[in-house]
Amino acid sequence: MNSRNIKLAKFAGFCYGVKRAVETAKKLKVENPEKNVYILGELIHNSDVIKELEELGIKTIYSVPQKGDGICIVRSHGEAPDVFEQLKNAGFEVVDLTCPDVKKVQQRAVELAKDNCFVVIVGKSNHPEVIAIKANADLYSDKVAVAASVEELKPYEEIIKAQKKVGVVVQTTQMVKTLNDIVEYLNSITGEVIVHNTICQSTAMRQKEAKELAEESDLMIVAGSKKSANTTHLAEVLKDITRTIHIENSSELSEYQDLINKSEKISITAGASTPQKVINQVIEYIEKEN
């Protein structure tokens, strides 16, 4: 067998927002061993990390109880303003670990809503980050729509045409192409469109680098949770360029053994919520097969 050329993307694994959230959660438990430490919703979309946090005594809860005791962490995706109130009213000490980039999107959406714009949030309506962005904008306007494609925006076409101004923000982990398609459509049906490209720098650089690697690879391996928006978008982008497989971890690689055997140039990238340990195990598997 020919010796393989294996490359790892520089921008692979934890982004600074995720790293900050995971490290802070662990630190809070170490510094408060006698207190309960909870996270509202999964801290990040990675089951290995959630399990590790649980083993440290950090519990994940999925709704706000009537009575709380201890510390409750708001994860990097952010939460609606009323959820912060519910947590405080329940008696929790609230630690807000909303990613600074996500906070910026919330602020931009609020500014646009206050400026009497029809607000378009480019993203997946059921994603926790998008739910929180919309909830913030909804406080100041009843003209807020969420869309992950032009098709999803079509039902609002007549309302949008009647607006003086349309403002756009975008989920931090969205694809640039999705944003561009929606902005192009809005420009074709309305006058003034104010666009805030709030895709975070980490996501933009990760996608750009992965695309460049895909151009010169026989096979791209994307490691990370199937629930992670930025990881699934990464895989979607790369599938148009070269053969791409999206795995949660190295245990799934045996399913693609034939494909791996046939590939001489293999590049590996990973989502923003993928731990370094998972990336290392993928590299070890490919190198072992070399």
Image (tube, grey):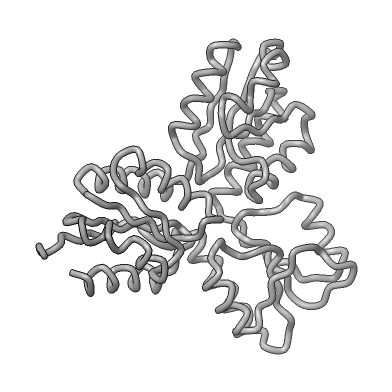
Quadrant of the image for the C terminus?
Answer: bottom left
Residue nearest the observer in this picture, 176 or 152: 152
| Residue drawn at point x = 56 percent, y = 30 percent | 149
User: In the image as oriented, which residue stretches furthest toward the front?
Assistant: 258
Q: Residue 95's spot in the image, x, y percent?
A: 68, 66
- Number of numbered discs overlaid on the protein picture: 0
Left or right side of 151 for 39? right
Q: Residue 246's spot in the image, x, y percent?
A: 41, 55
| Residue drawn at point x = 72 percent, y = 37 percent | 137
Quadrant of the image for the N terminus?
Answer: bottom left
Q: Quadrant of residue 162?
A: top right
Residue nearest the observer in this picture, 194 or 231: 231
| Residue drawn at point x = 53 percent, y = 25 percent | 182
Q: Residue 91's spot in the image, x, y percent?
A: 85, 70
Q: From what the image shows, is residue 115 above or below residue 170? A: above
User: In the image as oriented, which residue stretches furthest toward the left?
Assistant: 2
Left or right side of 229 for 206? left
Q: From what the image shows, is residue 139 above or below residue 49? A: above
Q: Residue 199's spot in the image, x, y percent?
A: 48, 41
Q: From what the image shows, is residue 234 above or below residue 139? A: below
Q: From what the image shows, is residue 107 above or below residue 232? A: above
User: In the image as oriented, which residue stretches furthest toward the right?
Assistant: 66
